[in-house]
Image (tube, rainbow, N blue to C red):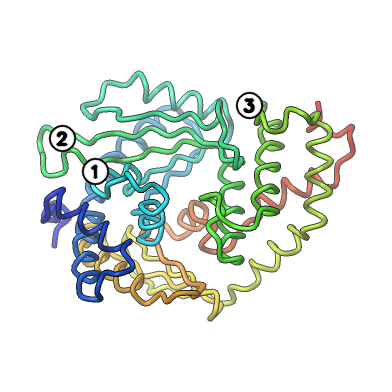
Amino acid sequence: MALKDNVLKFSKRQIDEAGNVLINADSSFEEKNSALEVLGNFRSCHAYPINTFQATLRTKLNKTGIDYLVSQRLKRTPSMLLKLERFPNMRLSQMQDIGGLRAILPTMKDVEKIVQLYKKAPLQHVIKSEKDYIQQPKDSGYRCYHIVYKYKNNTNSNYDGLMIELQIRTRLQHAWATAVETMGTFIDHSLKSSQGPQEWLDFFSLVGNAFAYIEKTPTLSIYNHLTKEEVFEKVKSDAQNLQVITQLEGFSEVISNIETDKKQGSLHLIVLDISNKEVRIKTFPKNAIEQASMEYLKEEALISDGSKKQVVLVSSNSLDSLRKAYPSYFLDTQEFIKTLRQITNSSTKHSYYL
């Protein structure tokens, strides 16, 4: 089925009811299966608007000459349900990040340039919200610039009203987020949602603050009682106590097999199966979004409670750029480890303190 034919089959009321059914522990197996069909259709419909945004983003970035990495993904069902549980007043039909697009850029100067380019650009889509988590970082240490658009297309109104979230971040901010997701996978907690052991939440918050010093962006007020030097010294101490580098390097060795189907296409279904020490990648052509979405739901349904398996449907032009854009699915935290080593091996005279 062609991408343009993948239209929304359900009303907002049906979509919201499906979300309620899926987070209700008393829902029957049949009710949840029906609700998953609704969720799957709603999620897959975000693919068309994402593709439109990606084409526009690449055009803008190519004109600037900035070295960039662009990726897109459809939000995982467990992440969607966790968000509905965390925010009881949220409706599934109004979730703003089901369709996510990300631009990863070398420096803060590049991020600022692209943010301004988008804010000043005449677009038919409506900006629903903006969150500058770089100037106002989250207490978790998360930093990134978010712009949520309400999609509008004068030539194809089938997807009007769907929300698309554009994230613009630096490579260092991306490295931090990757390490958080990777560690969360192994300790079986959603650290990126601020859930899990406090020692790990505190560590990544502290490192996020140290990274803010490196990039000369605003730091967290919760660390105002510490000097810059004390923040770096505490990162060194906590990293050693938690054996962070050793653990992250060990995780990357867990994946002994990366299996691809060798097919051509830009849609990739990534299955990270830690128990079997493998990553499986199924590739689909761009116009096979409905088939890919059905496979996405099937793979998600195979994940049992307590299983250390994750699956996500993403778009990327090559497997190389796929690995760079989604390193957490390959347990690849090299960039984070490199920066953390520079901090832990440094003295108070290191350039990071200047």
Rendered residue at 83%/35% (across/down): 230
Tell me: 45 left or right of 165.
Answer: left
Where is residue 82? Give x, y as percent: 41, 56
Mark earlier in primary sequence (1, 2): 1
Tell me: 223 left or right of 79.
Answer: right
Q: Quadrant of the N terminus?
A: bottom left
Residue 49: assigned label: 1
Residue 153: assigned label: 2
Q: Nearer the viewer, residue 9 or 215?
A: 9
Tell me: 201 left or right of 7.
Answer: right
Mark earlier in primary sequence (2, 3): 2
Spatial CA span between label 1 and label 3: 32 Å
Where is residue 272? Give x, y as percent: 48, 70
What residue sits right under mark 3 in the picture?
A: 217
Q: Quadrant of the C terminus?
A: top right
Spatial CA span between label 2 and label 3: 36 Å
Where is residue 181? Give x, y as percent: 55, 56
Badge 1 amino acid: Pro
Badge 3 amino acid: Thr
Spatial CA span between label 1 and label 2: 9 Å
Element on which disc 1 rests:
helix
Q: Nearer the viewer, residue 35 or 101?
A: 35
Q: Is residue 291 above or below residue 196?
A: below
Element on which disc 3 rests:
loop
Element on which disc 2 rests:
loop
Rendered residue at 89%/34% (across/down): 348
Residue 175: assigned label: none
Badge 2 amino acid: Asn
Q: Within the image, what quadrant is residue 124 found in?
A: top left
Disc number lying in front (2 or 3): 3
Q: Is residue 108 above or below residue 253?
A: above
Q: Check contact, mark 1 vs mark 2: CB within 8 A.
A: yes
